Amino acid sequence: MKVKTTWDYSLNHEAQRLIHVGHAVAIGFFKTNSFYPLPYGASPNFLTVLLPDLPYLTIPRFWKKVAKISIDQMHMIGQPQLTAQLEKLLIQTPILPPPNISSIKSQWEKISDKFFDQVYKLLPNKKSLIKEVIIWPTNFGTICSFSKVEFTPHKVYIWLRADGGVENIGWAILSALTRQDLIDHFGGLWQESQILVDWLMNETVLSKFFARPHKSMYTLRSKQNASLLEMSTKFLAKIGAPNIDSFTVKNIDTSSFTGREKKLLDLLIAKSPQIVTFDEINELLTNNYEQFSLYAISKSIQRLRDRLEKSGISGSFIQTKRGEGYMLVN
């Protein structure tokens, strides 16, 4: 069955994009994953997150509001008042031209059907999960963002930045199909999902569709760019964004946490920045080595990450050390 692609640019979507990106800024996601928020107009690349230099603080409690907004269903952010306020700020700024999508639209139309045919050969259990791809061209954010099919059945929504290419569309579709599976059924992380999709894009028949290689985690794990970091730090301070770090995690209100979540967080804090081993977590949670289960440990960590997210802090502050355990990053 042919998958339909719809392209739709609007100021309303741009305002929603700012909520989406603002959420990731406010919870510290970009900081813990080596992305650099910069003012719109800066040179775009995979590591940069572009934001217009707007007076966000004229919107009461803007950063606290966006930190608590769920973005799992990015097509249903459900913040009409906040969206309208951001639209008003965007209108008052120098006019931003809509992204020119004619070239990439033509490129995608040429490969879309063949791409999906090969995807479903590689992932036969995912066949027919997507009936429509809805692309929202944007000037802002990371190079692309996507919805997961578990939250938007039969549709994938993609924010595609103006400098994005067809490889970013392909990457977003594969991520939409696999990410939640990896998290729910294999205890996977955001970074591991990136690696899986990078491998599919580069080491399978899918690579023939794309001229530019896509190795997101290789890029993210490269040496930190001191110049971009300095520019980003100054820009975030200018727009009043919160400085979320491990100190914030250590002082979080845990009144809504379960007893197990509190104990696990306390252990991670006590040992930070050292690794908390699987054995130590098992002893804390079960006090019985015979009941040792990596799956149970990973699920407990995932629940704690989810709890942090609901409290306005990125779950990425708890990072996995493969084969060893977990640590609270500084």
Image: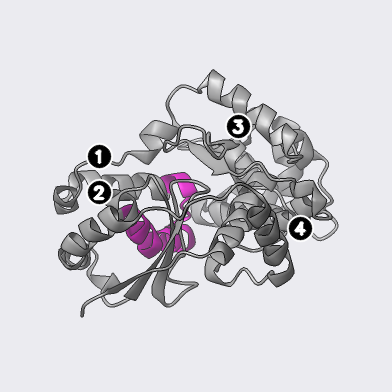
Q: Which residue is mark 4?
A: 65
Query: Which badge, 1 or 3, comes first in the chain's sequence?
Result: 1
- Provide the residue span drawn in magenta: 171-192
Q: Residue 213 got which mark?
A: 1
Residue 184, magenta (yes or no): yes
Query: Which badge, 3 or 4, comes first in the chain's sequence?
Result: 4
x, y (%) of residue 71?
Answer: 59, 62
Query: Which badge, 3 or 2, comes first in the chain's sequence?
Result: 2
Q: CA distance from mark 1 to mark 4?
A: 37 Å
Q: Which residue is mark 3?
A: 275
Looking at the image, residue 258 lies above or below residue 313: below
Whether pointer 1 and pointer 2 mark residues with C-beta atoms closer than 8 Å, the reply is: yes
User: How many neighbours does mark 1 have within 10 angstroms: few (below 14), some (14-19), or many (20 or more)?
Assistant: few
Say what amino acid the circle numbered 2 marks. Answer: Met
x, y (%) of residue 94?
Answer: 60, 46
Element on which disc 4 rests: helix
Whether pointer 3 and pointer 4 mark residues with C-beta atoms closer than 8 Å, the reply is: no
Say what amino acid the circle numbered 4 marks. Answer: Lys
User: How many neighbours does mark 3 have within 10 angstroms: few (below 14), some (14-19), or many (20 or more)?
Assistant: some
Whether pointer 2 and pointer 4 mark residues with C-beta atoms closer than 8 Å, the reply is: no
Residue at figure coordinates x 58%, y 25% from the top left: 229
Say what amino acid the circle numbered 1 marks. Answer: Pro
Q: CA distance from mark 1 to mark 3?
A: 34 Å
x, y (%) of residue 115?
Answer: 19, 62
x, y (%) of residue 1?
Answer: 20, 80
Q: Quadrant of the C terminus?
A: top right
Element on which disc 1 rests: loop
Element on which disc 3 rests: loop
Residue at figure coordinates x 34%, y 50% from the top left: 168
Q: CA distance from mark 3 to mark 4?
A: 33 Å
